[in-house]
Image (cartoon, rainbow, N blue to C red):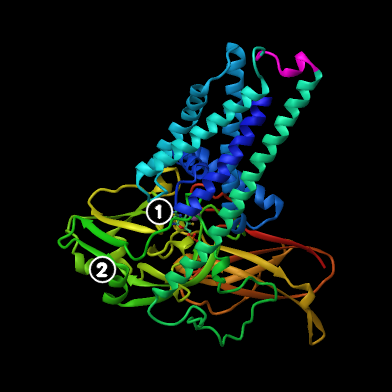
Amino acid sequence: MLGALCGALVTSALTAVLYLADQLAGLPFVPFDLFDWVTRVLPGAVVTTGISLMIDTMLLLNVSVAGTAKTAEQVMGVSQFLLLGTVSGALFFAVFKMRGARPDILAGVMAGALLGLPTVAISIVIGGSTLQPVLVVLWLAAAFGVWGLALRESYVRLYPEENFLEPREASGASSGVERRQFLIRMGAATATITVAGSGLGYMLAQAARREIEAETASLMPHGSVEQPRVSFPNAGDPVMPAPGTRPEYTPLKDHYKVFIRSKPTRIDGETWSLPIMGMVDNPMSLTIDDIRSRYESRDQFVTLSCISGRVGTDLISTTQWTGVSVQDILADVSPHSDARYLYITSGDGFYESVSLDMIASDDRIMLCHSWDGHPLPIDHGFPLRIWLPDRYGMKQPKWITGIEARRDLKQGYWVERGWDAVARVESTSVIDTVATGSAYEREGTTFVPIGGIAFGGARGVSKVEVRANKGPWREAQLRAPLSETTWVVWRYDWPFESGSFFFEVRCAEGDGTGQIEKRRGNHPSGATGLHGFSVVT
Ligand SMILES: Nc1nc2c(c(=O)[nH]1)N[C@H]1C(S)=C(S)[C@@H](COP(=O)(O)O)O[C@H]1N2
Ligand SMILES: [Mo]
């Protein structure tokens, strides 16, 4: 028990110090690295179940999945590390009690090494830190060494002198008091380190974030950060969203975020360049300036969605993507005629293949450098990501660091972990609002605006229908979408009745194909089924 407590205390101080060092010097934050490693090596099915469980919990608690998932993962990462430290502390105490020996300094260092060595190896392999490995090793050795020594010190203080088998209270009341006093002092000391370290670290993190955002913004040739450059092609559309419908154009800060690591990957835009190699006649390496200036950039309004989402969850967002057609770049590198795929690798260890046939068939496929008129935000893949129309996000690497033309297919990160290799977006429709507060009267009838979105990937949406209590389907009005690759905002003005209602919505794709109404979970090909909304009017 005491061992577990001491383990928890020194590990929380260690966690805070590691966090601070991460913010100060870019040294690895071991708890995240460990967690990322665990999720990478666990079988895909286990990770998928874990993620599903997390999403289901959030739906149950009725919190935003997009807004909470990453924080939840980070909390799990830190908890896992604290648990590891707690168990290590308990083991350390148990071993020395069993052996009836007093741990010497070496034992403390050994304990640090036992926990530290595998951790250091993982941190280096998974490579979040861009610092010299020697530095990383020295720092982590010191940090874990001190951790072990602190654990040893607490053991020696709690089980002093000759009678280390029995806690002090055996030899008198005053020793129990001393023990308690020591624990209080130790608690206070570790709490101070934990609070000060994480508080300072947090402030540094915020400052660094602001600085990087300012820097990436200055890389953009035109316009200032404050001026929205985006204008909406459907501004004049008479079909207005029902009050309470989500924004048709997602504010950038609200765009959902999904990535495999605990932290977004930081890439230095000044030194970054993109090698395009493998089976090509002219291998090239392009800087972000090359990409922006040598090729014609195009804008495209895009709805992106995550295959892990459930029907109606918020892992779907819309913004304007700007980038260059992959066809234009391929024209310069000239892939060999027997090359069949581009294998794309990312700064965070993510990877995916895109077939050259698909690229040849669609000039919209782009290497995207800007969102919403600004350089890609760090979280969303700065400096470069790919866009594939009609595919879930899992097929579309962010933070691209390399492209290789290949003959053989290397499956992507999530495909290897059991998700659909094609990952074509399933069409879906969602009720955002039954706006009883905005009821209005026309020709003696009261109407309640009902509204939401429908998304059919790049196949578009031709029809949306709504029904109440399993009654007949009624056609909704469609607002013109921002583009052929975004969701459609729909609205149905429902003739008001009072009672208890269950509304459902369905859509048809551009060619009339109905959305799949059968309920199906997200794994492996994306969720399907009707979205419903209950209200008492
Ligand atoms: N490098 C990299 N790219 C990635 C991922 C990732 O973890 N790493 N996640 C993918 C997944 S699963 C999704 S849904 C989208 C999410 O993009 P967003 O976070 O910009 O919304 O990014 C895709 N590209
Ligand atoms: Mo995703």
The image quarter containing residue 507 is bottom right
Q: Position of residue 442 (x, y in %)?
A: 78, 86
The image quarter containing residue 424 is bottom left
What's the magenta region? 164-172
Any part of residue 518 in sight: no
- Judge by depth and name the residue closer to the eye, 449 or 162: 162
Q: Secondary structure at mark 2?
A: helix
Amino acid type shown at disc 2: Ile
Amino acid type shown at disc 1: Val
The image quarter containing residue 251 is bottom right
Give me the disc on residue 422: 1
Q: Position of residue 334 (x, y in %)?
A: 18, 64
Q: Is residue 231 above or below residue 323?
A: below
Mark 1 / mark 2, whichever is N-terminal: 2
Q: Residue at x 79, y 87 (%)?
A: 443
- Judge by depth and name the residue closer to the eye, 526 or 499: 526
Q: Which residue is mark 2?
A: 329
Q: Residue at x 39, y 73 (%)?
A: 219
Any part of residue 68 in sight: yes
Q: Position of residue 536 (x, y in %)?
A: 82, 64
* Distance (Cα) linking label 1 and label 2: 24 Å
Whether residue 170 appears in magenta in the rendering, the answer is yes
Q: Quadrant of the C terminus?
A: bottom right
Q: Quadrant of the N terminus?
A: top right
Q: Residue furthest right?
A: 498
Give me the disc on residue 213: none
Q: Position of residue 138 (x, y in %)?
A: 40, 39
Q: Do the residues bearing badges 1 and 2 touch, measured as CB atoms within 8 Å? A: no
Whether residue 232 appears in magenta in the rendering, the answer is no
